Image (cartoon, rainbow, N blue to C red):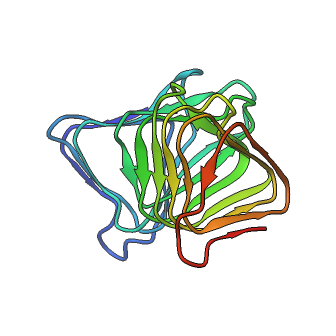
Amino acid sequence: GATIGGTLNCYGNGGGKAASFGSLTIASGGTYLATSGTTTITGTTNAAYAWIPTGTFTHNKGKVKFLTESTDMEMWITSGSKFYDVEIDSADPAGVYFYANEIYGDLTVTDGQFQAYTSSTTLIVHGNTYVEADGTLLTLAQSGTVTFHGLITNKGTLYSGTGTNNFNSGVRNLGTFTSNDTLTIGGTGGILE
């Protein structure tokens, strides 16, 4: 994995280039100026933090993609991390774990599961959410508040747990959707299809 103690600028000179790390730690005082393209995190150790931004992370409207072809590479995201776009593409059945994270753009779960590190933690997605055929989002055990401001298009597996489930623009369900409790569609024009 990489540790940034100074400044790593992947945005300069065009900004749209790709960057790839096994894991990424932005140390206190360090800065990662992300590409406006895709930063890929592939994992280095099973069941460990793969994203640790103690310092400054500037997303530059880019995507962070958690990608592994290994069936033994569960990845964790540090509490409080904020992103622009996120994609989960994990062959590990346990997938990637969020922990009180916020996504300002879109969330795409292409493959694997995106679930809470602890069931009481939270997730906020401001953009749209796409769960593809091989993707799974959340679990029935989710007790923390999840808020999706944009439309959720589900072609895979979507769960809502016992906590507060705010699906403000609704759900377009083309896959499997299982709810353990109440969900709220709070936006004007929100749908449940």
- Left or right placement of residue 152 versus residue 111 in this view: left
Q: Is 129 displayed left or right of 193 in the figure?
A: left
Q: Image quadrant of residue 119?
A: top right
User: x%, y% of residue 169?
Assistant: 58, 69
Nearest the viewer among 91 and 1 is: 91
User: Does 178 appear above or below 153?
Assistant: above
Spot occupied by residue 30 in the image (x, y as percentages of width and height): 19, 42
Q: Quadrant of the C terminus?
A: bottom right
At 36% from the left and 43% from the top, the residue drawn is: 81
x and y percentages locating residue 28 in the rendered image: 18, 35
Residue 59, placed above or below residue 22: below
Which residue sits at x=50%, y=64%? 149
Nearer to us in this view, 175 or 185: 185
The number of callouts visible is 0
- Decide: is 45 above or below 114: above
- Is residue 10 found left or right of 189 in the rendered image? left
Q: Is residue 179 left or right of residue 125?
A: right
Q: Name the spot of residue 16 as percent of width and height, x first.
A: 44, 71
Res 4 → quadrant:
top left
Asked whether 157 or 168 is in front, the reply is 168
Instruction: Tell me what residue is drawn at x 65 percent, y 40 percent.
Output: 138
Specify the farthest residue to the left: 29
- The answer to which of 101 and 4 lies nearer the viewer is 101
The residue depicted at 44 percent of the width and 32 percent of the height is: 1
